[in-house]
Image: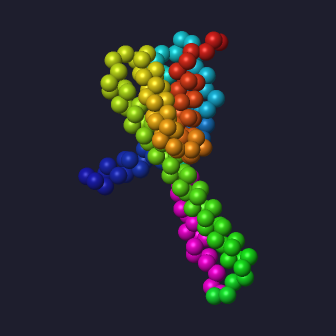
C-alpha cells in the first residue's frame, strides 16, 4: 500500500506544472514585508489594527536584521582570531593593526547586541501595552508614552544619548510616529 501511495504521489508531482501552480517566491511580496518598509505611509483611513501590524512587522524586521548583524560580526571576529599571526615577533604596526581589527569588530558586535536588546524590550513592551489597553486607538499612544518614559529614565540615569540602545528606541519612537499618525493623502 505504501508503494502505491508513493507512486501516485510521484505521478502527481511529475504531471504538475510548477510554473502555473506554485507561486514564485522571488516576485511575491508578503504583507509583513510591505508593512515593515521604512518609507511606509498609511492612508488616513487605515485601521488601528493595520497600524499596529505595521509596527509589529517593522520591529520583527529590525530584530531579524540586527540578529544577522550580530552573526556577521561574530563570524568576522572568529575569522580574525583564526588568522592570528604565527610569528612571535610582529612589527609594532602589524600588532597594532591586528588589535585594532579585533577591537573594532568587538565594538560592532557589542553595538548590535545592544540594539537587539532594545528592539526586544520594545517588542515586549508593545505586547504588554496590547494586553493592558482596552481600545485599539489607545495602544500606540500608550506605547509611545511608555517608550518616551523609558528613554527619559535612561538619559537621566546618565546613559549617553548616542548609545546604540537609546538610538534604537528612538528609531522605534519615530516608527510609532510614522505609522500611528494619519497622513493626509
* Residue 80 part of the magenta segment: yes
The residue located at (51%, 43%) in the rendering is 158
Determine the main secondary structure of the stretch shown in magenta. helix
The residue located at (56%, 44%) in the rendering is 160
Residue 172 x/y as whole percent = 53, 33
Residue 136 x/y as whole percent = 40, 17
* Residue 109 part of the magenta segment: no
In this image, 11 relative to 179: left or right? left
- For the residue pair 161 and 127, the one nearer the viewer reads as 161
- For the residue pair 164 and 19, the one nearer the viewer reads as 164
What kind of colouring is applied to the model shown?
rainbow
Residue 108 can be seen, yes or no: yes
The quarter of the image holding the C terminus is: top right
- For the residue pair 31 and 44, the one nearer the viewer reads as 44
Q: Which residues are magenta?
A: 67-87
The residue located at (65%, 67%) in the rendering is 101
Residue 68 x/y as whole percent = 54, 52
| Residue 121 placement: quadrant | top left
In this image, 145 relative to 72: left or right? left
Using the image, determine if residue 74 lies above or below residue 178.
below
In this image, 121 relative to 32: left or right? left
Using the image, determine if residue 55 lies above or below residue 5.
above
- Give the farthest residue toward the bottom: 88
| Residue 95 placement: quadrant | bottom right
Residue 35 x/y as whole percent = 54, 29
The residue located at (66%, 67%) in the rendering is 100
Amino acid at each position: 500500500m505504501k508503494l502505491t501511495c508513493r507512486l501516485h504521489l510521484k505521478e502527481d508531482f511529475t504531471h504538475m506544472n510548477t510554473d502555473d501552480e506554485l507561486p514564485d517566491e522571488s516576485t511575491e511580496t508578503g504583507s509583513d514585508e510591505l508593512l515593515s518598509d521604512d518609507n511606509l505611509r498609511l492612508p488616513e483611513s487605515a485601521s488601528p489594527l493595520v497600524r499596529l501590524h505595521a509596527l509589529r512587522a517593522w520591529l520583527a524586521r529590525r530584530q531579524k536584521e540586527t540578529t544577522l548583524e550580530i552573526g556577521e560580526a561574530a563570524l568576522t571576529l572568529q575569522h580574525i582570531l583564526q588568522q592570528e599571526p604565527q610569528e612571535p615577533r610582529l612589527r609594532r604596526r602589524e600588532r597594532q593593526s591586528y588589535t585594532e581589527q579585533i577591537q573594532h569588530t568587538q565594538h560592532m558586535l557589542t553595538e548590535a547586541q545592544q540594539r537587539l536588546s532594545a528592539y526586544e524590550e520594545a517588542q515586549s513592551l508593545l505586547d504588554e501595552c496590547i494586553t493592558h489597553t482596552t481600545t485599539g486607538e489607545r495602544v500606540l499612544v500608550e506605547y509611545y508614552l511608555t517608550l518616551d518614559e523609558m528613554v527619559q529614565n535612561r538619559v537621566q540615569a546618565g546613559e549617553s544619548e548616542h548609545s546604540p540602545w537609546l538610538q534604537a528606541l528612538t528609531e522605534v519612537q519615530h516608527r510609532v510616529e510614522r505609522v500611528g499618525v494619519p497622513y493626509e493623502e
